[in-house]
Image (cartoon, rainbow, N blue to C red):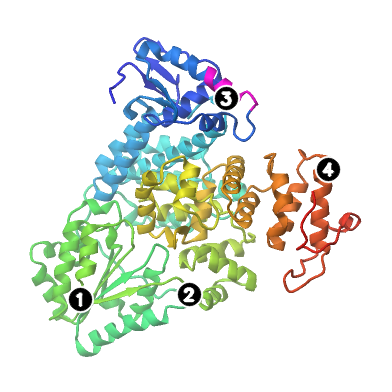
Amino acid sequence: MDEVSSLTVRLLGGPPARSDAGEIALGPAQRQAVFAALALHAGQFVSRKELIDAVWGERPPDSATGIVYTYISALRRALEPVGGPLVASRAGYRLDLPKQQVDVHVFEAELERARAHRLAGAHQRELESLRSALGQWRGSALDGIPGPFAETQRARLDELRMSALERQAEVALYLGGYRELVDELTVLVERHPLREGLHRMLVTALFRAGRQAEALAAFDRARETIIEQSGLEPGPELLTLRQRVLDDDPSLHHRDQPERHRPTTPPGRPSIFVGREFELARLRRHLSALLNEGRGGTVWLDGEAGSGKSTLLAQALASVRSRTRWVTADELTSAVPLNLIADSLGGEALDDLGKTVTELCEAGPRVLVFEDLHWADEESLLAWQRLHRFTARLPLLLIGSARPLPRRRLLDVLRSELDGEIVSLPPFDAPAVAALAEETLARGPGRDFLEFAAEYTAGNVGYLCELFAEFADGREATTAPHSRIASIVEAHLATLSLACKRTLNSAALLGSSFTVAGLADVTGREPTALSEAVEEALAARVLESEGERLRFRVPLVASVFAANTPPAIRAVLHQEIAATMADSGAPADRVAEQLLQAGDELTAPWIPRWVLDNVRALPAGPAVELLHLLSRQRNLTEEQHQDLAGELAALLLLPATDAVPSLPAQPWCTPLHALARVRDRTAPRTS
């Protein structure tokens, strides 16, 4: 693509189009909405239907096709002085412009560079990329541009900006820029009072700047605001930060040069420990061999974020804390070569690892724990491999733990070539979920809640604990994730690429399962173009396959991705997905699943007719819920109201059979008796 050197597109504030001569007048707001849709798909053809949907959504005027044609003609005239980059074909329209001349694409490309630097441990370069990304913003995203497409993109871009701001502050704080950060973070917490990460960094920055009293005051304001606006206590990280400030915790101070051998105190026995009997027994067998026979060994502990690796190790090793050295890698300290080895064994290990570990074991059996090896620097991983070889002749139990993400080639090689024992932590099963609830909750949650919790979290221990904490605070069981648990999920998936996250946002709207073809319909992208993002999600175990269909492995994660789309836009998208499914002949229950997710906003004019034609092909429960939701819409004719009410009455008052079980009584169904047309559900419906 030849570069159109004099045209730049600004959708993150400022005039949308500029040339060397200044601002290019694009005309009315809806014409700008067409231009924005083309610019966000720069280099790709956008169909007329997609442009109509972008501007008007499900309720376009009858003349929408002609209006779009007029807008395109006007935009082509406006852009002629900069080389005429607007191209038309049978496939639609294309803005023939390099992505580096569209600020949104530059912003996203810089975020991807920052992510790559993050995984490589190059944090100064990560900070530079984050600053470059945020430097693209000159105001609000798609400011003043109307339409459902612009609204969805605005919400998505605003969330990306906030995530980038938080990460920029986190990296700058780690690199020592805490004094400069205080003013910036003060403004950010005022604008975004429910983002606990910003509050934590402000408290930390004030503390490191020697302003302890102000740090405590900032914590008090944060806690008061979060409780007032969300009804929940802040998360444990923020709550424990106050005590660390009061205690003048040395680890909270900034270190210009990371210490080579800071003390590492193994955690004590956890106050609550349930389940994991099989995995605990395997660890204790190794510990018994070490203590009773002086026989070393290696254990590799596999588990996703929140699976309880640390808790299991703390329980297993509680009796040998004095013989244990325990270090944890993290994504910031991974930039320092051999950091983990020095932290565990002292600086002398960097000169002669064999001599250091041999002298350590001469005083008796030892346990070395290296947690979160997915963040370890490569030099530390290679040294860990050497330590593994020492376990064959020394009374040394070497334990490493890692998540499946981020994927590291060297880590995969180490694991595949390991001749020690690999212990994988599966999700909690139903008895373990019940046992955890019994230990953590003061009141019995009931079987329905436990079943919901187990299914919603897919047995992830960390998510279960957070869900139980919400239950203890009086929160009802719901599939809409609260901010605290959503932030935990997002932190666990932070290393996914931007393209993968965008794909998952769309996938989360498709229901309990979906196909790549269905995902292509929603995203407007070819199935081949989605393959890389889908493969990344499968490798990360965010998605799993069921034959030709895909689904989110953890329903909570799907809810978090779905929540990234504003509710009003979700309702529109669910109805559009349902229409696509209905047109393609999808089963009625899958179409109904999409309509039910639209909630009270069932406004598309095709829906009443479809429901009346298909209601008897649906299970009784979803049919009643869908009829009830639809009967409350204000855009129905009197005849539609009568037909829907009659079908609803027939379902509610139908005698129970083996095929159709009785439905629970509803307080609002009494008036329907007058409308009931009780009939055999299997009889054909007359028009």
Please name the residue that numbered disc 1 is placed on.
Answer: 419
- Left or right side of 528 for 586: right
Residue at 20% over, 64% down? 413
Provide the secondary structure element on which disc 2 rests. Answer: loop
Q: Is residue 64 above or below residue 170?
A: above
Please name the residue that numbered disc 3 is placed on.
Answer: 65
Q: Is residue 21 above or below residue 665?
A: above
Residue at 32% over, 83% down? 284
Residue at 44% over, 63% down? 547
Please name the residue that numbered disc 4 is placed on.
Answer: 639
Q: Is residue 214 above or below residue 446?
A: above
Near-viewer residue (44 or 476): 44
**Magenta range:** 61-70
Sequence-earlier tag: 3 or 1: 3
Please name the residue that numbered disc 2 is placed on.
Answer: 272
Q: What label does residue 573 carry, if any?
A: none
Amino acid type, label 4 = Glu
- Across and down, in percent, residue 401 comes to 30, 67
